[in-house]
Image: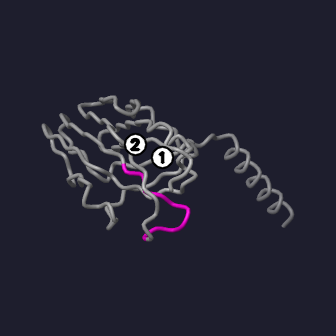
Amino acid sequence: MKLRSVLFLAMVLLTVTACAQEEPLGPEALPTDYNYAAGELNFSVALGGVVVQVTDVQVYASDGNIATGYVYVVPTVNVTNQNETAVSNRDFTLVDEYLNEYESWQTNVAFGSALQTMPEAIGQGQSATANHVFIVPAAALQANLKLRWDSPVTLSRIDVALGNLGAAVP
């Protein structure tokens, strides 16, 4: 009985030691076969036949449809696709320096009539200009937000830095 306990303890210690030595991929680490490009507001960023340009970013205060302390961040995005794989509007997120990700929402907002929605998919040879609506904590406006297009299908990621969006919205 004691031998069995000692062997069990030895196996547990070996397993814990082996797991502790492996370094898992961090949340920002990309596989080595991923392609990556980055840019900033008003500059075109191209990667694998896809061009993304953010021409404008508007920040709107809560219209009563979102929680207190949150704002709408609405970038205007130009996308041109020369890749065989369609660019999906679901491949866009907003990411802050703490790696918080915010999904795009096409929601009923007071300013919705002024927005252009992105088509579900932008096929090869097509272009689109559209707005994405992101609901983010107001504190994230100072957290180096960037628009991210991430395609696991084409193993490509483009980040566009949005610049300083201010401290708060009236």
Q: From the viewer's perspective, is residue 161 above or below residue 132?
A: above
Residue 128 x, y percent position in the rendering = 19, 44
- The crowding category of the residue bearing disc 2, from other C-alpha atoms within 10 Å (few below 14, some 14 to 19, many at least 20), is many
Q: Between 112 and 50, which is closer to the camera in this rendering?
A: 112
* Location of residue 9 by image quarter: bottom right
* Location of residue 103 by image quarter: bottom left
Q: From the viewer's perspective, is residue 108 above or below residue 98?
A: below
Look at the numbered disc 2 and give the secondary structure of its residue. Answer: strand
Residue 140 forms part of the magenta stretch: no
Q: Between 94 and 121, which is closer to the camera in this rendering?
A: 94
Look at the numbered disc 1 and give the secondary structure of its residue. Answer: strand
Mark 1 touches mark 2? (CB < 8 Å): yes
Residue type at numbered disc 2:
Arg
Q: Earlier in the sequence, mark 1 or mark 2?
A: 1
Query: Which disc is residue 95 wearing?
Result: 1
Query: Which disc is residue 1 wearing?
Result: none
Residue 99 x, y percent position in the rendering = 54, 46
Q: Quadrant of the N terminus?
A: bottom right
Residue type at numbered disc 1:
Val
Residue 127 x, y percent position in the rendering = 17, 40
Residue 23 x, y percent position in the rendering = 63, 40
Outermost residue, left side:
125
Q: From the viewer's perspective, is residue 98 above or below residue 111?
A: above
Measure how far apart labels 1 and 2 are at the Cα level: 7 Å
Residue 70 forms part of the magenta stretch: yes
What residue sits 56% from the left and 44% below the top? 142
- The crowding category of the residue bearing disc 1, from other C-alpha atoms within 10 Å (few below 14, some 14 to 19, many at least 20), is many
Q: Which residue is mark 2?
A: 148
Residues drawn in magenta: 65-74
Outermost residue, front side:
170
Outermost residue, bottom side:
64
